[in-house]
Amino acid sequence: MAKELIRLSDCFVQFDDDIILDHLNLYINDHEFLTLLGPSGCGKTTTLRLIGGFLKPTSGDIFFDGVRINDVPPHKRAVNTVFQKYALFPHLNVFENIAFGLRIPRTDSSGKKKVRLPEEEIRGRVLEMLEIVNLKGFEKRSISSLSGGQQQRVSIARALVNEPKVLLLDEPLGALDLRLRKDMQNELKRIQQQMGITFIYVTHDQEEALAMSDTVVVMDGGKIQQIGTPEDIYNEPKNAFVADFIGESNIIDGIMRADQVVEIFNRRFQCLDKGFQKDEAVDVVIRPEDVDIVPEDQGQLRGTVTSVTFKGMQYDIIVDFYGFKWLIQTTDFCPVGSHIGIKIDPDGFHVMKKSQYSGLFGDYSSYSEEYEEISDVDYDPEAEEDQEGGHEE
């Protein structure tokens, strides 16, 4: 069973009249790779600063291994931080940059005497870290001779060489180009697993969050919107904000007519969702990759292609369904102006409760009488309801 290492309890942060964190509650397990994900201003970096000791909450408590640490200064916490700006010393070589923190005298167990680590121990720990971050043999290199990715590795090694229990990473890959970012995503996950310590990562990049994390915390407006594994966050978003922020989404107004029966555009379709009130208004998410293109006369819906973008592995196409536009991702080329049909399997619908975000992201609920003739030709929920006596509880 995972051991809880950090807990933020009812943390509230306010600057003047601005609420930055709104009574946030969060726990983080030992050895976990947890990512705080959200847009600028959502409170993710403030949360990181609370854990690091760079900021005190207006109210609420922070616990580390069961001990309240609100008043513990940053240098006395078993935490280290890697920032987007590496802050390496240009006049020191790679070895001395990593060894810098180890050379600072430390208070001994009695709390009265300052002691220095033996040079042999410093050398052994630095060389070990260079091997972990794949920079073995780089110890004499100057910082200016390194690539951006190599400098980031030095920054990570310098943070880890002091053996913290937790490493905080505040958008550390933001200054790297796309290829380097992808390489470093794999490296960070490997380092975290090899070191066996807790990583708390801040980013606004959904791909980074999904690729590296054990747990993703999606934030907006100083509040946590959803916590879960990358798979849960992507496949089962809790509201329209999460669905829109994590991946591409078509979000439509719908009505749950019964268990596993959702209505969009005044027509009913099978889905897998249950537990809603009969005739409850809902948000319906359909991911672009869950839409199959079929000949026009075989489609549940029919529309006209208005835009095509080649993305390498697939085409991103925009399809206009009588004024309602969807994004569809497909390997099939469909030229602009072509008429297509689409089909969606029951597991392609994800139904969410209405929230404060309903109508803000991809709300294409305009209705056209032309939809009366367009429905799932293979499924008649009304006939099934008549046969089974309906789904009312």
Image (cartoon, grey):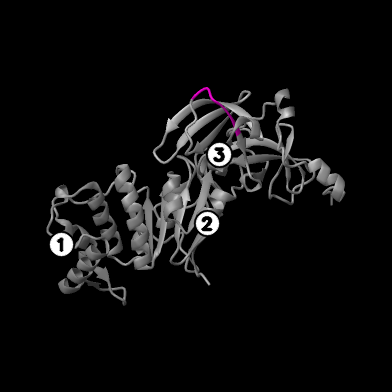
Q: Amino acid at mark 2?
A: Thr
Considering depth in this image, is 379 or 87 the residue closer to the camera?
A: 379
Q: Is residue 127 magenta?
A: no
The residue drawn where x is 50% and y is 30% is: 334
The residue drawn where x is 21% and y is 66% is: 126
Q: Position of residue 175 (x, y in %)?
A: 30, 43
Residue 249's mark?
3
Q: Seen in the image, is 220 located left or right of residue 372?
A: left
Of callouts 2 and 1, the N-terminal one: 1
Marks 3,2: beta carbons within 8 A: no
Q: Estimate the spatial distance between the alpha carbons at disc 2 and disc 1, rounded to whole Å.
A: 37 Å
Q: Callout 3: helix, strand or loop? A: loop
Q: Position of residue 179 (x, y in %)?
A: 30, 45
Query: Which of label 3 and label 1 is nearer to you?
Result: 3
Marks 3,1: beta carbons within 8 A: no
- Mark 1: give few (<14), some (14-19) or many (20+) Cα within 10 Å: few
Q: Estimate the spatial distance between the alpha carbons at disc 3 and disc 2, rounded to whole Å.
A: 19 Å
The residue under label 1 is 137
Considering depth in this image, is 135 or 263 the residue closer to the camera?
A: 263
Q: Seen in the image, is 139 located left or right of residue 6?
A: left
Q: Is residue 338 magenta?
A: yes
Considering depth in this image, is 166 or 317 the residue closer to the camera?
A: 317
Residue 229's mark?
2
Of callouts 3 and 1, the N-terminal one: 1
Which residues are drawn in magenta?
A: 336-341
Q: Amino acid at mark 3?
A: Ser
**Location of residue 228 with respect to 381 vertically, above or below:** below
- Mark 3: give few (<14), some (14-19) or many (20+) Cα within 10 Å: many
Q: Callout 1: helix, strand or loop? A: loop
Q: Position of residue 137 (x, y in %)?
A: 15, 62
